[in-house]
Amino acid sequence: MDYGNQKIIVSFRPSSHSYDATIVIQFKTEEEARQAAQKANNGPGYRSGSSYGNLALISFSDGSWDEPDETLAEVGEGEKVNEYGCYQEITVKITLPAGSSIETAALLEPAQAGLLRWLLNKCKPIKVKNTKEVKMFTFSYKGESIYDRDINGKHAFYIDQKTIYVEKTNVEVIVHI
């Protein structure tokens, strides 16, 4: 694909999710994003458009992910375009005992420590809230799908080519998209 002076090569991976690929287009205004999403919904092919603020998300399914170029020509390229095999936006809140740190988290639960280290590396900025009883870390993640809601009563995160299962007792996940 050619976006001005910048050439982007995209390869899509097979997905077990309902959508095979997602284009996230950032526009100047919310109205432009809403109109782009509406155009995607009214156009040909197996695709779904939605808008969130000044972002339009256009997802492709049923093997129709060879249409991103045509879709961008139809709905507009906006200010910035990102393409994902399966896009997800989540907030992860991890609550630890007061006085805990990332380093001491490994002593509490090894799986949770691995998730914490990965989130620290991928999610900036990180919000930390301290109370007398707990320390809460809040991470906002946007990108390839990494989270599955519930596997055997635990949160399941697919990171660094492995699955990390985390107890739900002190980890809250909010799925935005």
Image: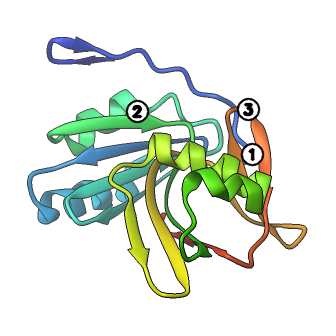
Q: Mark number for residue 68?
A: 2
Q: Which of the 4 image quarters holds residue 33?
A: bottom left
Q: Residue furthest bottom?
A: 132
Closer to the eye: label 1 or 3:
3
Going 67% across and 33% down the picture, which residue do you hit?
Answer: 160
Residue highlighted by disc 3: 161
Q: Amino acid at mark 3?
A: Gln
Closer to the eye: label 3 or 2:
3
Mark yes or no: residue 39 visible: no
Q: Residue furthest left?
A: 28
Closer to the eye: label 2 or 1:
1
Asked whether disc 1 touches disc 3, contact meaning CB atoms under 8 Å apart, the reply is no
Label 1: few (<14), some or many (≥20) within 10 Å? few
Going 14% across and 39% down the picture, which residue do you hit?
Answer: 79
Instruction: Decide if residue 27 is on the left or right side of residue 126.
Output: left
Spatial CA distance of label 1 from label 3 is 15 Å
Q: Amino acid at mark 1?
A: Ser
Residue highlighted by disc 1: 16
Q: Amino acid at mark 2?
A: Pro
Position of residue 8 measured from the top left corner of the image (x, y, whole percent):
34, 17
Is residue 77 depicted above or below 137 in this figure?
Answer: above
Of mark 2 and mark 1, the one earlier in the sequence is 1
Of mark 3 and mark 2, the one earlier in the sequence is 2
Spatial CA distance of label 2 from label 1 is 19 Å
